[in-house]
Image (cartoon, coloured by chain):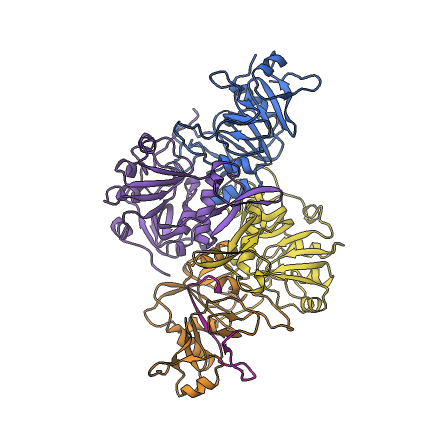
Chain colours: A blue, B orange, C purple, D yellow
Amino acid sequence: MALDKKQIAQRIAQDLEHNTYVNLGIGIPTLVANYIPKGINVEFQSENGVLGMGPFPFEGEEDPDMINAGKQTITTLPGAVIFDSAISFAMIRGRHVQLTVLGAMEVSENGDISNWKIPGKMVKGMGGAMDLVASAENIIVAMMHTNRKGESKILKKCTLPITGVNCVKKVVTNLAVLEVTKNGFKLLERAPGISINEIKSATEADLIIEGEIPEMDV
Amino acid sequence: MALDKKQIAQRIAQDLEHNTYVNLGIGIPTLVANYIPKGINVEFQSENGVLGMGPFPFEGEEDPDMINAGKQTITTLPGAVIFDSAISFAMIRGRHVQLTVLGAMEVSENGDISNWKIPGKMVKGMGGAMDLVASAENIIVAMMHTNRKGESKILKKCTLPITGVNCVKKVVTNLAVLEVTKNGFKLLERAPGISINEIKSATEADLIIEGEIPEMDV
Amino acid sequence: MINKAVNNIKEALLGVESNMTFMFGGFGLSGIPENAINALSKKDIFGLTCISNNAGIDDFGLGLLLQRKQIKKMISSYVGENAEFEKQMLSGELEVDLIPQGSLAERCRAGGAGIPAFFTPAGYGTEVSYGKEVREYNGKPHILETALIADFAFVKAWKGDTAGNLIFRGTARNFNPLMAMAGKITVAEVEELVPAGELDPNQIHTPGIFVQRIFKGEKYEKRIEQRTIIKR
Amino acid sequence: MINKAVNNIKEALLGVESNMTFMFGGFGLSGIPENAINALSKKDIFGLTCISNNAGIDDFGLGLLLQRKQIKKMISSYVGENAEFEKQMLSGELEVDLIPQGSLAERCRAGGAGIPAFFTPAGYGTEVSYGKEVREYNGKPHILETALIADFAFVKAWKGDTAGNLIFRGTARNFNPLMAMAGKITVAEVEELVPAGELDPNQIHTPGIFVQRIFKGEKYEKRIEQRTIIKR
């Protein structure tokens, strides 16, 4: 069975490292916060200027002066800190935020990512995505394996305008976990019940497949 | 009579403009704060990180966490603000501080200044001087007209390692007030009782002398 | 202390003209200078270049200036949530320059700090880097970005004093301190204006030297774009 | 919250080695990390490169490391007030790199902010600009300066919490927040260490993400270099 969005988030959460700072993008990545493994402590940075984000506020306690990068009302946890946008991106660009999880429209086998623009369609802008992908040591992409037309989003080469080059380290989709290696995508895990052939046929890029490919534990 | 150091400071104080931010260097410039003309309001910036410096503290109220760029204990006035060294030099480099008054060993007719290094002698460093002279819109030099050997410090060309180029706008010495123009030093004022010839003979650079040269009002 | 207080929004906006470049603090609708935007949207000034992370929504924030077609060009990082914007952009009426958010913040700070240009990795290899100088540092390509300044910067703080010192609240801080640095004339509006001396000098976010005019905003609506809550 | 508190100075200095590059916050003797400096001056590490605006005095601050000849190279803006320094410098034992104060501050910030290089007008036409790229912006020549980073940055704050968040007091702030950003490992010592959650998130000068270790200094001497006073 292919994973649903929650399960993709759950699988990515397994990759969180203890005592690290993490930036979660909008969409599936936001859900990762719900599945932090026991014993793992991470602190969430939001690029609009907060570190130590907590859950959404209780009804009636929403504060227009306290939002995340998705413009959602939030709360903060003990030890949180507020800062301006320049310091926020100093944290990101200076690699103090160790992991970025974000969505994508396409990922290519050299780690390029496209997620901000579709020619001919309204362009909303890159927001902080270009800074994030150009900076973080570790970048995990959370997305569906194929687009609505059933076309692969895992490509030899991105066809859409790119957001960053040679930056994605790992991709977690509804079908598979892929590592971006020097030689291209390496298949690490399969969604439960999904065969290697199913993954291959949904993937435009070549896959490096070595030995047994385990099922994801979700 | 040639001016003493206090009178040099007093003369410079006459040039202060209302509602401006001013950085005073160590030595004679520091004394300028004692002669602010009536009706003129200026705010002093110290590059180690304070705006709105007040007088020295009362005995017993010295605070090691409250010093100026000369490492002297100070107080702050209402409206003062503390900031870090990067923001401090953002104010300076970004031309938010309008006037810098500083001392010099030599000034040349194109506005170069030397005030940080004598070859063969112990070099203490430029501190913030290079940032200050490269940045402020208006730079006034306060110094004695000649050095201890009686040699002119007002030169065609600086002989000592320079601190900044084309930056000095005005020089106030114990003998004269000089403006740095495109064509060189222009004599604006004489110290009381000092003749033009006395100034000329103490000055290595050429002087532009047009019409009557008034005495300084000190 | 140099007194920066002005009596009203009219004085605060003295000198704004058509074809000027304005900066606006805020992220989404959080921390935007509501009062200045409202007043500007009633003035007959047009052909504006506006630097702001976002472009408001249709009936609030910069959306108000868009509706009257006062804006010629937007310089932003993200401009969704605005149908009028989309219409004008697609029709070619509105020029749009999209900039990575971190580069936008740093370019404003640089403008205020007298740093004319700097290298950043953000945008390398993308269309953002077209025509920009590329240089490798630490084995990684970087592009040269230049400083941004504005004729007027409009910012919004929580508290301010008559010396122009500002304190922000929560994530309404965002771009405000950086744009305050980069305005030739920076106009700060605050929810509370106190006499100089009442704020702790250690706890000021924006030193008054960066602010030319300060006033207490008449009214703050402070709209929330995405009201996300949990039930008790 | 990521707990950055360490139990003692020994844990705080874990991993310091000869030939490393260290940054030290402080201006003159104000805001220097006294406890870290004292402890380092008792360790057998040598050949250090030290980045600090000043070099202390003979018997306090970095003067202590100079006396034991632990420092190979100083990167500073002003190094007066220190006879031992002068002796070692004139004899050629000590290498000295003098940097304009504003460039030093900005280069540390840049190192922490992932900005590998930037243009500044400071030092153009002087020996500081030897070998550096010159480019004109706004009709004025600027030189290209590069970022500074350190293996360890030692900073001193007034208050801190276990998450590493720091608040400084008065002009003891100076270079501390910038060097905190630029250390691969940043060690903060504080006069008061409180549990995470006790500091107002709006009023923190250095976010804890920039700090890897924090401890309460055992003792603060806080010497005054120039005691200037007026009589009552």
- D90 sits left or right of C217 in the view: right
Rendered position, B48 above or below D177 = below
User: Mostly what secondary structure, the magenta segment?
Assistant: loop
Which quarter of the figure is the C terminus of chain B placed in? Answer: bottom left
In the rendered image, the residue lying farthest to the front is C131
In the rendered image, the residue lying farthest to the right is D44
Rendered position, D185 above or below D79 = above
B148 inside magenta stretch: yes
In the image, C168 versus A177, the foreground residue is: A177
**Residue range of the region highlighted in magenta in the rendering:** B133-157
Q: Residue at x 67, y 44 (%)?
A: D7
Instruction: Give the percent coordinates (x, y) of residue B108.
Output: 49, 73
Instruction: Give the percent coordinates (x, y) of residue A94.
Output: 56, 43
In the image, D30 versus A156, the foreground residue is: A156
A75 inside magenta stretch: no
Which quarter of the figure is the N terminus of chain B placed in? Answer: bottom left
Instruction: Give the percent coordinates (x, y) of residue B217.
Output: 36, 81
Rendered position, B190 above or below D159 = below
Can you see residue D192? no
Can you see residue D212? yes
Rendered position, B193 above or below D184 = below
Instruction: Give the percent coordinates (x, y) of residue B140.
Output: 44, 70
How many marks the image carries: the answer is: 0
- B3 sits left or right of D69 in the view: left
